[in-house]
């Protein structure tokens, strides 16, 4: 199959199962024999990874500082990694991207969505994802999965109400852009989630667009 390099992002709240989803997508791209890279946000580029460390491990950050650091990291990531990769014909899969800023900093922290939109246009511009998989998990289930797994970073220590706002933020984003953002029911078993993702990737007709 010869198709244009595409940009796929994974989104969801805590413990949604993005790592499992990533492996399902990688399997599909390997079957198609297309070159790809896997990256993440915040991070994905050396200076952006340094910013990630501040974001996740500083004891307290003002909401606006958090937002600006997310976009500072993203600017480096887009300009130095994502855009050049797509330009060279390499697919990009990113564990989180700009929808997370709308969900977490917009809906979660209450920062003005139009302001976030301006930062999006300034930093991401046309390098928008072709497909976003929103792994929609009930916050109680997701938090339970994540707490069974590892120690919590700064953002993960937020309360249930915060994660419910994140979920409704993603739901708003999906309703506004249903062609790009596809909802996956992530409350189900690992194999049922994998099946939904594999089916979606195989049948997504966007790939055929020039
Ligand atoms: N953030 C932001 O605020 N604004 C932004 O613009 C961006 C990010 C880009 C990144 O942290 C934090 O930054 C994140 C949002 C914020 N904070 N939070 N919360 P991260 O990258 O370290 O964390 P994460 O993105 O939330 O990843 P995660 O905790 O690793 O979640 P996950 O990748 O979705 O989960 P997982 O590792 O695939 O699965 C979690 C566990 O559940 C694991 O033990 C699995 O085996 C298990 N699991 C997965 N799927 C299932 C199913 N279906 N059934 C049962 N168990 C399952």
Image: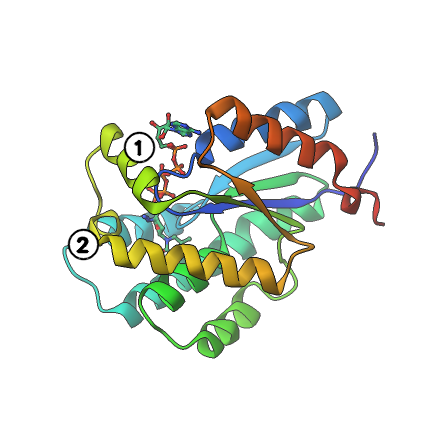
Which sits in the foreground, 150 or 58?
Answer: 150
- Relative to 126, is 137 on the left or the right? left
Give the residue at the far left of this rendering: 59
Give me the residue at 68% from left, 35% from top. 201
Q: Which residue is mark 2?
A: 58
* Pointer 1 residue Cβ closer than 8 Å to ligand 1: yes
In this view of the protein, which residue sits in the foreground, 146 or 6?
A: 146
Res. 56 mark = none
Q: Position of residue 65 (x, y in %)?
A: 28, 68
Image coordinates of residue 168 in percent, x first then y, are 43, 59
Mark closer to the observer (1, 2): 1
Q: Residue at x 83, y 43 (%)?
A: 208
Which of the two residues, 195 or 41, is positioned nearer the viewer here?
Answer: 195
Q: Quadrant of ligand 1?
A: top left
Q: Residue at x 83, y 29 (%)?
A: 1
Q: Hey, which quadrant is residue 187 in on the image?
A: top left
Q: Is residue 27 above or below residue 101?
A: above
Q: Secondary structure at mark 1?
A: helix
Q: State how far apart marks 1 and 2 are (Cα).
A: 24 Å
Q: Residues within 10 Å of mark 1 (few under 14, many from 20)?
A: some
Q: Residues within 10 Å of mark 2 (few under 14, many from 20)?
A: few
Q: Which of the numbered marks, if any, corresponds to residue 145?
A: 1
Q: Could you tell me residue 36's position as x and y percent?
A: 63, 33
Count how many numbered circles sit on residues in the image.
Answer: 2
């Amino acid at each position: 199959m010869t198709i244009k390099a595409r940009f796929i992002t994974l989104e969801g709240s805590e413990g949604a199962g993005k790592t499992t989803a990533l492996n399902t997508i990688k399997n599909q791209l390997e079957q198609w024999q297309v070159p790809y890279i896997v990256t993440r946000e915040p991070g994905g580029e050396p200076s952006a990874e340094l910013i990630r460390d501040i974001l996740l491990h500083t004891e307290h950050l003002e909401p606006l500082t958090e937002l600006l650091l997310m976009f500072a990291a993203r600017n480096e990531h887009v300009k130095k990694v994502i855009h050049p990769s797509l330009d060279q014909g390499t697919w990009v899969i990113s564990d989180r991207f700009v929808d997370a800023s709308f969900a977490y900093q917009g809906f979660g922290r209450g920062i003005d969505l139009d302001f976030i939109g301006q930062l999006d246009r300034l930093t991401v511009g046309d390098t928008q994802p072709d497909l976003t998989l929103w792994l929609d998990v009930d916050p109680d289930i997701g938090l339970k999965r994540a707490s069974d797994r590892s120690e919590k970073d700064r953002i993960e220590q937020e309360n249930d109400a915060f994660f419910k706002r994140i979920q409704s933020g993603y739901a708003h984003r999906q309703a506004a852009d249903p062609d790009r953002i596809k909802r996956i029911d992530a409350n189900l078993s690992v194999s049922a989630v994998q099946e939904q993702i594999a089916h979606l990737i195989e049948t997504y007709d966007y790939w055929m667009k020039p």
